[in-house]
Image: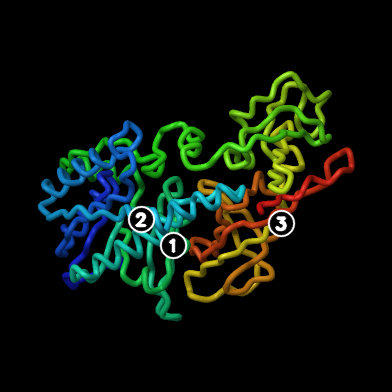
Amino acid sequence: MSTVTLRQRVVVGLSGGVDSAVTAWLLKQQGHEVLGIFMKNWEDDDNSAYCSSNEDFVDAAAVADVIGIEIEHVNFAADYKDRVFADFLHEYRSGRTPNPDILCNAEIKFKAFLDHAMRLGADKIATGHYARVRLNPATGLHELLKGLDPAKDQSYFLHRLNQAQLSKTWFPVGEFLKTEVRRIAQDIGLPNAKKKDSTGICFIGERPFRDFLNRYIAKEPGPIKNDKGQTVAQHLGLSFYTLGQRQGLGIGGLKAKGAQRGGGEHAPWFVARKDMSSNTLWVVQGHNHPWLQSLHLQAQQASWVAGHAPAPRTLAAKTRYRQADAECVLQDVDDSHFALGFTQAQWAVTPGQSAVLYDGDICLGGGIITDTQAAEESKNNSNPPNQKNG
């Protein structure tokens, strides 16, 4: 966040966590008029052990009291259900693996929340995300940058933000390491200074994911087949599995001979493909199996931070959060879709997840992965089954 000398009215999304708390404190110290907003995005079972929104609000209110700012509780649950959760279920029913946090940022935190803040007379909004915004004087465009802490950078989740949203947004803690944020919180006596970081979206929390999904999506059992076409088990329904998944497959008693496909007799099994047309789950043995490696992908529903597609060139990409940047060539790109070719094969590239592009520290945008291509044919000269998502 650039230094600002003008006092501004800033509405901060207070989640109850330490990052948003320090965000509010930093802005107050800079002389801004700060108002906290606690966003309630889920209420179907918010009294359960898996959803902590009630205690999060208590923490957020305690933080506001210490900092000396007002806090408002705003319910966006209906917006969340319509704009995020409905899409989440549609994607899973189609065999893909969505990332609801990305859609939540685009539709709730930087749309519904931003609109609400503007109605309150805000000049800016701020959140506790580890990212940065910079105005490029040469282009007049706002750039989305990675947070300075590489272990906490959250620009991947923010890549759908546009110029209008970024022009109204600050990310103060993006300039700090997480350890520094914790230290600040402790030094100023914030009650949540040692609170554990949130590990998931509220409506899932720490609960068994398959049990939660089964409340909304019916089980449709079918065969689990290996790369030789042999049926090795039965699955519960393709919606309940994701590419690269190792746990919960229920495969036993069938071992691959030797060290084939980077595996070995006791190598673990991984989900490699989902064929919606035949309701077949394809699995392979060994982390390095060719079916799990992709050199190319296609992405749709592209969103570009600058408002237009970048020129085809060599860039870096992430196909999942916390993945190291992977060198790639941007190809066949326009405002709605693009293709990527990777220098090195990427592991378990998953339809429904986002491919996000970077030019150094600058996040350019990204899109939803729709198709992948295996790096090579399997060693018995059969091609992997196509990923068919209906």
Query: Where is the N terminus found, in terms of image quarters?
Result: bottom left
The residue at the point 26 percent across, 68 percent down is 124
Residue 54 image point, x, y percent: 24, 40
Discs 2/3, front: 3
The residue at the point 62 percent across, 32 percent down is 246
Which residue occupies the foreground of this view, 45 or 261? 45
User: What's the colour scheme?
Assistant: rainbow
Local SS, label 1: strand
Pointers 2 and 3 in contact (C-beta within 8 Å): no
Q: Seen in the image, is 88 located left or right of residue 272?
A: left
As shown in the figure, which amino acid type bears the numbered disc 3?
His
Residue indicated by mark 1: 145
The residue at the point 55 percent across, 52 percent down is 91
Which residue occupies the foreground of this view, 181 or 126? 126
Residue indicated by mark 3: 296
Residue 86 image point, x, y percent: 46, 54
Pointers 1 and 2 in contact (C-beta within 8 Å): yes
As shown in the figure, which amino acid type bears the numbered disc 1?
Leu
Which residue occupies the foreground of this view, 96 or 140? 96
Q: CA gap, disc 3 to disc 1?
A: 25 Å
Q: Earlier in the sequence, mark 1 or mark 2?
A: 1
Q: CA gap, disc 1 to disc 2?
A: 9 Å
Residue indicated by mark 2: 174
Instruction: From this view, report whether residue 268 is shown above or below residue 192.
Output: above
Residue 109 image point, x, y percent: 34, 59
Local SS, label 3: strand
